[in-house]
Image (cartoon, rainbow, N blue to C red):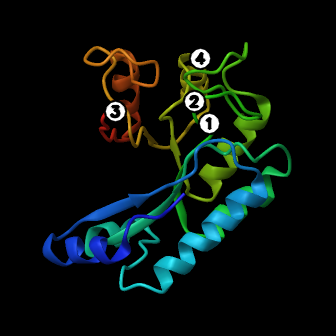
Amino acid sequence: NQLPNLKEISKSLAVNSPQYIQIYYFDGSQTLEQMKEMMDHALEMIENSDVELLKTAEDFKTKNGVFMTVEGMCGVKDNPEQWVQFMKDHHVLIASLCWNEANALAKGAKGAADYGLTDLGREVIALMEEKNILLDVSHASDDAFYDMMKVATKPVFATHSNARALCNAPRNLKDDQIDMIGKTGGLIGMNGF
């Protein structure tokens, strides 16, 4: 996978203020080591560009730049403390537990598992909240979504989801799910599906 062209991003950020661009490029099948390599590579590319990495909530109010997210923590099968600390050390601000398929943490929108959120997934959410990493529910199955909402104590985000009433895809949100996210103080980002 490739990062977006950082020179083009830089030009866009120079013209539009304030603005941020989310960078994520996992497809849900990576091992923990592959995910670590990808994050290290992304940070190296950002550091070697003229694009600023947004690291805190305050940065969004005062700066233009990019921020790190993780889509689908499929590589996390044990040692969640180590992985969540790694994300924090790499300035990840938002992370989702699953992509479209099921993993050790949660079932994705197209997953065939008979569970929503696992005990390990509950543990990961608690650790993320301790480290101020926001929970992204995009791609979660309905049962995983509702399980996550029971566990989450901070604002919940759907960084790239639409209303299922407008586009009936399993990864999009039902009306009650949209309301639930709003009640946490979270946000929903639109996508092309």
Q: Which residue is mark 4?
A: 143
Residue 15: percent from left, percent from top: 14, 74
Residue type at mark 3: give it.
Gly
The residue tagged with tag 2: helix, strand or loop? Answer: loop
SS category of the residue bearing label 1: loop
Q: Residues within 10 Å of mark 3 (few under 14, many from 20)?
A: some
Q: Which mark is residue 150?
A: none
Residue 14 percent across, percent down from the top left: 19, 78
Q: CA distance from mark 3 to mark 1?
A: 21 Å
Q: Where is the N terminus found, in terms of image quarters?
A: bottom right
Whether residues under marks 1 and 2 lie with C-beta atoms below 8 angstroms apart, the answer is yes
Residue ID for mark 1:
98
> Mark 4 touching mark 1, by CB under 8 A?
no
First in residue order: circle 4 vs circle 2: 2
Distance between the alpha carbons at the discs numbered 4 and 1: 13 Å
> At x 47% / y 35%, what residue is drawn?
138
In the picture shown, does residue 131 fall above or below 7?
Answer: above
69 in relation to 111, above or below: below
Dot placed on the residue nearer the N-terminal end, 3 or 1: 1
Task: Write down the quadrant of residue 64 in the picture.
Answer: bottom left
Left or right side of 82 for 189: left
